[in-house]
Image (spheres, coloured by chain):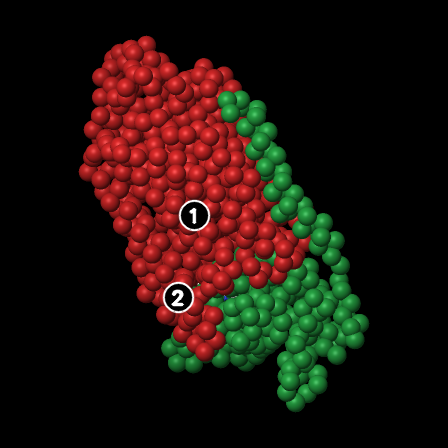
Chain colours: A green, B red
Amino acid sequence: MNRGPLIFLGVFVAMAFSWYGMIVSPQRQIGGQQQATVEPAGIRYPVPRPGLAQRGAEVYRANGCGYCHTQQVRPRGYGSDFERGWGLRMSVAQDFLFEQPAMLGQLRIGPDLANVGMRWNDPQWHYRHLYNPKSTVEKSTMPQFPFLFEMRVIQGDRSPEALDLTGELAPPKGYEVIPKQEARALAAYLISLQSPLSLFEAPIPAEPKKDAEPSTNTVAVSSRNSQMLGLGESLTQ
Amino acid sequence: MNTQPSALANSAGPVSGDSAAAKSRVLQIDRSCRLPLMFLIACSLVWLVAGGFLSLISSIKLHAPGFLSQSSWLTYGRVYPAAMNALWYGFAFQGAMAVALWLMCRLGRAELMGGKGILLGAFFWNVAVKLGVLGILAGASTGHSMLEMPGYVSPLLFVSYCLMGVWALVTFHFRQERQLYVSQWYLVGALFCFPWIFTAAQLLLVFHPVRGTLQAVVSGWYGHALITLWAVPIGLAVLFYFIPKLFGRQLHSRHLAAFGFWTLAAFGGWGGMHAGAPVPRWISSVSIAGGMMMILPLIAVALNWHLTARGAKGPENNQVFRFVQFGAIAFFAASLLDIGGSFRVIGEVTDLTVFTTGVKALYLYGFFGMTIAGAIYYLAPKITGCDWPSDQLAKLHYLGSVVGILVLVLGLVAGGILQGVRINNPEIPFVEAIRSTIPFLGLSTLGGLLLLAANLAFLVNVIRLLALCCCTNCFASNRSPAGSGPAAAGANL
C-alpha cells in the first residue's frame, strides 16, 4: 500500500458501494412514491397541507422545534409510543411524502408530535402553550416562545384571539397578548399533524371495544380539525 | 524530540532520522507550514470557544426553560444547531486541516505547497461558517441535522475546502519519501471522503431534494459518515503517527493496520438510520449491521496499538502524550458506546435520547478534540520556532478537558439511558420522565462549563504563542532564522 492512487481508488469503490446501498437503492425503492388511495373511502393520502399550516412548518423548522420533538411513531412493541397515545399506528414513509424538509427529529426532550393535532386541536391551547408552556402544563420544561406573540394596548374590544392568561402570566391591565402571524401558522401546522388513516403497510388495529369502526373518538376529533383546516371531509369518512 | 535509535531512521513513518542534514530539512518543512497552519489553528480554537459558549447556552436551556427566551435568535432550536455547526465546521475542520497538512508534509518529507492558496481557502471557509452560523441563528436553517447551514453558504464551503484540500494532495503527490505510512492512508481517505459526502448530501437535500423520509436517510447517512469516514480517520491518522513515536517503537503491524483501514472504509458508510424509523425496514437493518461491523476496525486498531506499546513506558510528564492517550481511550469508549447503541434491544432505550448526544460529544471532544490538541501541542512550537509560553495554561487545559469531558459525557449518557427507560415506561407521565433527567442535564452543563474554561486556556496559550512568534520572527528579523527555537522547542513537553 505505497501507491496513492491505489488508496484513492479503494476508498472510492468503498464509498461508491455504501452510497449505492444507503442512498441510491432507497431512492429507487421509495423515491417515486405517489399518493396512495386509501380504501374504503378512496381518499388520496397524504393530503397536501393548506397554505397557513405549510407556513407553520417553516416556523417549526426555523425555530428548531425538531431538536426536542420527533415526528415518528415507532412500531408497536418497540418503545412505548402506542401506550403513550402518540399515534394509532406507526409512522411510515407514506406519511412524509409532501414534507419539505422532513423533520423526523432525533431527540425526545418533548413528546412525539406526529399526531399532536389529534391530541390538541384548539389553536388557543397552542398559543398559550407556546407563549408559556407552564400556563397549560404546570411542570413543563419546554422553553417559552414569547417572540411569536405581541403584547399590545387593548384598543376598543379585546381581540377574540387574545390569550387567556391568568395569574403571574397575565399581561398588565389594559394590555393583551395576541399571536403574531407566525404563531397562527405554527398552531395550524401543529393541528395538521395527524395521521388517522389506516394504511396497507401500517394498519390501525381494530379496537376490540364497543365500536366496529376504528377508534371513533379520534376520528371525531380529526373531523373537526380537518374541516377547520379545509382538508376536506373525505379524510374523515 | 529526536530521541529514537537511528536504526529506525530510514523507514517511512513518524520515527525520523538524527543527522544534522535531516534536522535542517525537517526545520525547512516545518517553517513552510508556519503561516497557513497557525492561521488555521488560531481560527479553529476561536470557533472551539465560540461553539462551546453556544452549546453551554443551549445546555442551560434544557433545565432552565425561561433562560434567554425573549429573543428568537437565542431560542434552543437555533442555538443548539448553531453550536454544533460552529464546533464541527469551525473548530474540527480547521484543526483537522492544519494537522493533516502538517502530517502530509512531515511524512512525505516535503515542504508545504500552496501556502497562499490555503490561507485564502481558510479565510473563505471562516467567512462561510460565520455566515452559516448567523444564518442558523436568524432562522434560515435547512432543518437537516449537521447540514443546517443555509444553502447559500454550501458552495462557498465546498470551494474553500477544495482550495485547502487540493494542496494537501499536491504536497502528498510531490512527496520525497515514496513509502506510505498508515497515517497517510487515513488522511488521503478522509480528505477525499468529505467532499463526496458533503456534495452528495447537499445536492439531495438542499438543491434537488429527495422526497419525504429519504431526506432523513440522506442526512442520517451524512451525519454518520461525517464521524466514521472523516473525523475517525483524521483522528486515527494523528494517533497512528504519535503512538509509535511517543513510545519510540515501530508500528507493530502494517498488515493489521491495512485490515483496519479497509474495514473502516468498507463499513463506515453504512449507517445512520435507527431501528423503528419510518423508512423501509431493511434500511435500518443494514444501518444496524453496518454499525456492528465497526467492531472490526476497532479491534484491528486496538490490537495494533496495544502490541506497539506493549512493555514500553510512555514518556513522563509529556503534554502531547497525555492528550493523545486520552484521545485514544476516548476513541474506544465512544466506538463501543456507538456499537452498543446499534443493537436493537439497546437502541430501543437509547435511540432518540441524549445518550446519542453524549456519544457524539465523546467523539467530538474526547477523541477528536483531544487528539488534535495533542498534535497542536507538538507541532505549534515546531512551526513557530517558539516554546509554549505557559505550562500552567497547558496543564489547566488538560485537567479541565479531562474532567469536563468526563462529567459532560457521563451526564448525557447516564441521563439518556434514564430518559429512554422512563419514556419507554408508559406508567410515568412524560413530563415526570423528562424532569427526572434534569440533574443529569445539569451535570452535562457543568461539564460543558469546565470544558469551555479549559479551551479558553488553550486559546490564550495559542494567542500568546503567536505573539511570541511575531516578536521573535517579524520584529527581530535580523536574527538568524534557525535561532535557538526549534531545537529547544517542545523540550519541556
> What is the x, y in percent for residue A36?
76, 64
Front residue of A60/A98: it is A98
The residue positioned 63% from the left and 71% from the top of the image is: A89
Residue B487's image quarter? top left
Mark linked to residue B418: 2
Give the quarter of the figure containing the N terminus of chain B.
top left
Which residue sits at x=40%, y=26%?
Answer: B102
Q: Is residue B427 left or right of residue A222?
A: left
Query: In the rendered image of this protein, does residue B334 appear above or below residue B261?
Result: below
How much space separates mark 2 and mark 1, taking CA atoms?
A: 21 Å
Q: Which mark is residue B335?
A: 1
Q: Is residue B441 above or below residue B268?
A: below
- Image quarter where the C terminus of chain B lies is top left
- Amino acid under disc 2: Leu
Looking at the rendered image, the disc whose residue lies closer to the viewer, 2 or 1, is: 1
* Chain assignment, label 2: B
| Foreground pick, B130 / A113 | A113
Say if residue B486 shows up in the picture: no
In the shown orientation, is residue B388 left or right of residue B69?
A: left
Find residue B111 and report its horizontal and vertical position in percent: 42, 17
Can you name the residue that lies furthest to the top here?
Answer: B21
Hey, what amino acid is under mark 1? Ser
Q: What kind of element bears circle 2?
A: helix
Chain holding disc 1: B
Instruction: Say above or below: B357 vs B86.
Output: below
Whether pointer 2 and pointer 1 mark residues with C-beta atoms closer than 8 Å, the reply is: no
Find residue B39 and report its image quarter.
top left
Q: Is residue B421 visible?
A: yes
